Image (cartoon, rainbow, N blue to C red):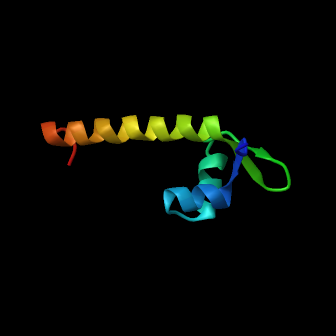
């Protein structure tokens, strides 16, 4: 059975960033997590955040193609 929670280190490896960056996203309230001797993030929350970022990135690319963003 797969783990229900990810750690900041696991997400940093998945997203190719630092664990500090993941903690910053949590502090900013963009990613929900609980601190249980270290931050734990539910996988469904990870998938929600990734989908939200994908939509935002797609919209930015669309606007760049249309000339709204430089």
- For the N terminus, the quadrant is top right
Residue 49 higher or lower than 9, as above or below:
above
Q: Residue at x 22, y 43 (%)?
A: 69
Count of numbered badges drawn on the protein: 0
Q: Is residue 26 visible?
A: yes
x and y percent of residue 39 in the render? 75, 52
Residue 39 higher or lower than 31, as above or below:
below
**Left or right of 27, for residue 52:** left
**Residue 42 sits in quarter:** top right
Q: Which residue is drawn at 30% across and 35% down?
A: 59
Residue in front for this viewpoint, 57 or 46: 46
**Left or right of 20, for residue 57:** left
x and y percent of residue 60 in the render? 29, 40
**Residue 11 sits in quarter:** bottom right
Furthest-right residue in this view: 37
x and y percent of residue 43 in the render? 64, 40
Furthest-bottom residue in this view: 18
Q: Which residue is drawn at 46% across and 36% down?
A: 51
**Residue 30 sits in quarter:** top right
Residue 53 higher or lower than 24, as above or below:
above
**Left or right of 47, for residue 61:** left
Q: Residue at x 55, y 38 (%)?
A: 47
Furthest-front residue in this view: 1
Residue in front for this viewpoint, 49 or 1: 1
x and y percent of residue 49 in the render? 53, 39
Q: Can residue 30 be seen in this view?
A: no
């Amino acid at each position: 059975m797969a783990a229900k929670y990810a750690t900041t280190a696991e997400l940093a490896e998945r997203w190719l960033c630092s664990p500090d960056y993941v903690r910053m996203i949590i502090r900013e309230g963009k990613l929900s997590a609980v601190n249980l001797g270290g931050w734990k993030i539910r996988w469904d929350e990870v998938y929600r955040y990734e989908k939200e970022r994908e939509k935002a990135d797609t919209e930015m690319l669309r606007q760049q193609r249309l000339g709204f963003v430089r």
